[in-house]
Image (cartoon, helix red, strand yellow):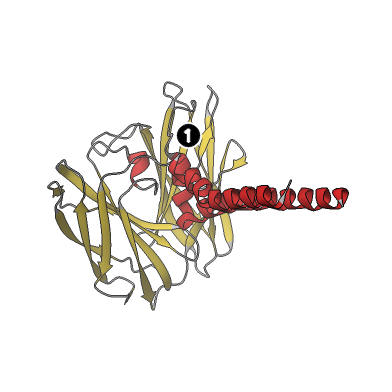
Amino acid sequence: MNAKRFSAVFTFAFLAVPALAGAQISASCPAGLPVTMSMTAELPSTVASASVGFHAVMQNTGDDVIRNATIAVDVVQKSTGATVDRFTVPQQVTLLQQSAGKADFVWKTSGGLASGDYTVRATLVQESTPLSAVFSGALSPSATTEITIRDGAAPGASISAVTVNGAVYRPYTTVRISEGSAQVVAISANGAGAPYKGTLTWRLYDADATSTDAALDTRTESVELHPDTSTDIRYVLADSTRDGYFLEGQLNDGYTTRYIDIWLSRSDAVFPWMKCAADAGANGSRGGQRNAIVVIAVIAAVIALGAIWEFTKKRHA
């Protein structure tokens, strides 16, 4: 391989890095609404139990009117990745073609929130959007901002792990299940110095259920924990008539809330957008890891070509 040819190969590989990395994401993410979105908070920080106002600005860059859209809001504790609140804004959004719109909403913080930083994410969703996708992070447009909670409460009970049929569940992924039943186990741990008394409510939805559809099943389990103890809360899926299910768990004691989201499927055709949700979960860190793998692979190929070139030069010397 002469110097000119090697230079051409190196240049191609270098230019291909961003293209390949971008392709890893764009190939798996669903097409979003033609809308850009930004959001600001009226305060950068507040105390637990206070209300915080938010202002969202949206720009419809498309040629069609977007009607009766809704803003879905979820709040994630940055230190743990736990979803501590979620809600939809009552005010619906209509955006004319090539026009801007805005929406204001309030987050009433819980008095049981621990001190620390929280990410507030607002996502514009249409009426027909499945519940399984609304808070998955796979949809666009969305906007985020951070709020710091001061003078918060001591940490209470949390969900330390989740298993599905005995295997540890990774957040923002789909679990393939067989034709038989599936058993989900949430492990709740109380690291506080006081007893914990609350409930864990399971809600099971069809894969395509929207906000107007009722849950297929709802169960509430009592959760009582002494300090520094844990317990298993089980949900057994016995229904085998559908290809996919979205299971939401809500741990609540009247002061704090923790959400669990689990996607179950019997077919690869269910939840195809979950590949993008995995990228969006944990603030896109998985997407970054995937891109890093592509970059490393290309660099390794370039290094290998360089080694071959050096070997060829020495051999012909």
Q: Is residue 208 left or right of residue 102?
A: right
- The residue lying toward the viewer, choosing from 235 and 76, is 76
Query: Residue 204, how many percent across, how many down?
Result: 39, 36
In the image, residue 79 sits, relative to residue 257, either above or below, namely below
* Residue in view at x 50 percent, y 44 percent: 24
Q: Is residue 208 left or right of residue 78?
A: left
Tag count in the figure? 1
Identify the element where label 1 is drawn.
strand
The quarter of the picture where residue 178 lies is: top right
Residue 58 in view, yes or no = yes
Q: Label 1 belongs to which residue?
A: 264
In the image, residue 252 sits, relative to residue 173, either above or below, namely below
The amino acid sitting under disc 1 is Leu
- The residue lying toward the viewer, choosing from 114 and 281, is 281
The quarter of the picture where residue 63 lies is: top left
The quarter of the picture where residue 104 lies is: bottom left
